[in-house]
Image: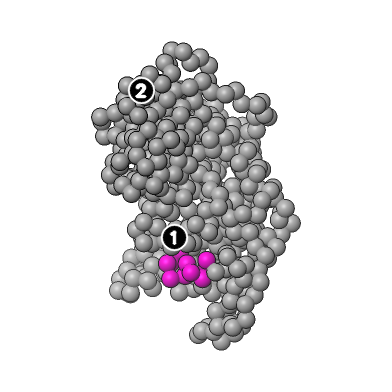
Amino acid sequence: MSEQTATQAFRDPRDVSGPVAFVVRVVEGIDAGREVRIDGTEPSAVLVGKGPSATLQLRDGAVSRRHLSLEIEEGRLRVRDQGSTNGTRLDAVEITDAFAHGGEWLRIGATVMRIELVAAVPAAPRKEEAAFARVIGASPAMRRLYPLCERLAKSDVPVVIEGETGTGKEALAEALHEAGPRARGPFVVFDCTAVPANLVESELFGHEKGAFTGATSTRKGMFELAEGGTLLIDEIGDLDIALQPKLLRAVERSEIRRVGGTKPIKCDVRILAATRRDLEQEVQEGRFRDDLFHRLVVARVELPPLRKRAGDVEILARHFWKALGGEGAPPPRVLDAWSHHPWPGNVRELRNAVARQIALGDLDMTKLDASAPVKNDAVDEEIGAILARNLPYPRARRMVLAAFDRMYVAQALEASGGSVVAAAEASGIARRYFQIIRERLGK
């Protein structure tokens, strides 16, 4: 299609009134004729690329798996390159992040696309939810997710939950569990970053007595503990690649084999996975198996960071204030300061700020930087003592993490008056997982 013909086919933006949508159509290249429509109701940004997660999937060999994303913001189409190999051009300009208004040419690899502005089809009215189970938020970014979450909760397919640290991935996973048919079964969390690499297989799949030094009895793993319920594999992007084939077999066959065992054990478990990493990028760089990625990403939910959830800070702050035992309501001055904070630590940082405000009183939030490091001589002394022993890195790291867990749990329990429920809530982790850490430390 010539540029002149495509330009004549484009609808003049001035002819469009009311809500808008965009159609991105391939006009040149091997995929000519393919298109995608973006109308602002999508639960996350629309991906264009040759990977399986792309909504507009292309066969052009010069296009990356996740080449670019498309998203409507304030009546414009935001085009963001996703770190592609060969770049993205909007008209004649190479861009990483830009807005289109309609009528532009989009070039990636040998593929040319046309961006067209069209009138949006009015959506059927639906109840405007402000929460999905324990996940709270009335912002458009969150409300777009709730219909998808409702459908996923009723199904049994694997789901990958993506998002920055602190966005509430574990809370969403537990909400999917509680709103689904497995709600009466257990909800088990396994954090790939919290267990030493040499113990991950045993923790996930269990072990037989005598399987290795220290295995004095048979022990069930997370799959067996989650029987009839849901297993959340948190930070799955950090799982050692040597263990990924075993996880793939467990997911595909619904059976596991304990370390040191010979008998396969059937497991009726729904798998949810959470990650702060870009799994497709991990696949490209050889750190995550392509076959496991395809098996897990049957569905995916991308949680937006708090800075993109307009209006949700106040809603969440009031919720946490009540849940953590605050009297009355948060002071208006503090609420206003929280509403203007960038929250790099997302919902978890906000929850901790609320807990700190309740515990320490009416702080001057205009001067308090929640992300500022706190000097702790006891911590420095213990870590210094570990480093002074010149231990191999894996052993030193385990000892430092154990020291951190011990001090963190002690501090959280002290702040909550000994309540495990309140300490887990303020810490931003599920109480079951907090209890596991506490029991491991003998607290």
The residue type indicated by label 2 comes to Thr
| Viewer-side residue, 396 vs 24 | 24
In the rendered image of this protein, does residue 114 appear above or below residue 29? above
What residue is at 42 percent from the left and 25 percent from the top? 116
- Residue 244 covered by magenta stretch: yes
| Boundaries of the magenta span | 238-248
Q: Residues within 10 Å of mark 1 (few under 14, many from 20)?
A: some
Q: Which residue is mark 1?
A: 290
Marks 2 and 1, Cα distance to the nearest angstrom? 41 Å
Q: Position of residue 307 (x, y in %)?
A: 45, 35
Q: Amino acid at mark 1?
A: Asp
Q: Would residue 340 be counted in the magenta stretch?
A: no
Are the residues at dot 2 and dot 1 in contact (C-beta closer than 8 Å)? no
**Residue shown at 53% from the left, 59% from the top:** 295
Q: Position of residue 309 (x, y in %)?
A: 50, 33
Looking at the rendered image, the quarter that the C terminus falls into is bottom right
Question: Residue at coordinates 51% horizontally, 30% vertically from top-left?
Answer: 40
Residue 316 visible in the displayed image: no
The single residue placed furthest to the top in the displayed view is 14
Dot 1: element:
helix
Residue toward you, 121 or 7 = 7
Residue that numbered label 2 is attached to: 5
Q: Neighbour class for label 2 at 10 Å: few (<14), some, many (≥20)?
A: few
Q: Nearer the viewer, residue 247 or 110?
A: 110
Say above or below: 163 vs 207. above
Residue occupying image coordinates x 64% and y 75%: 265
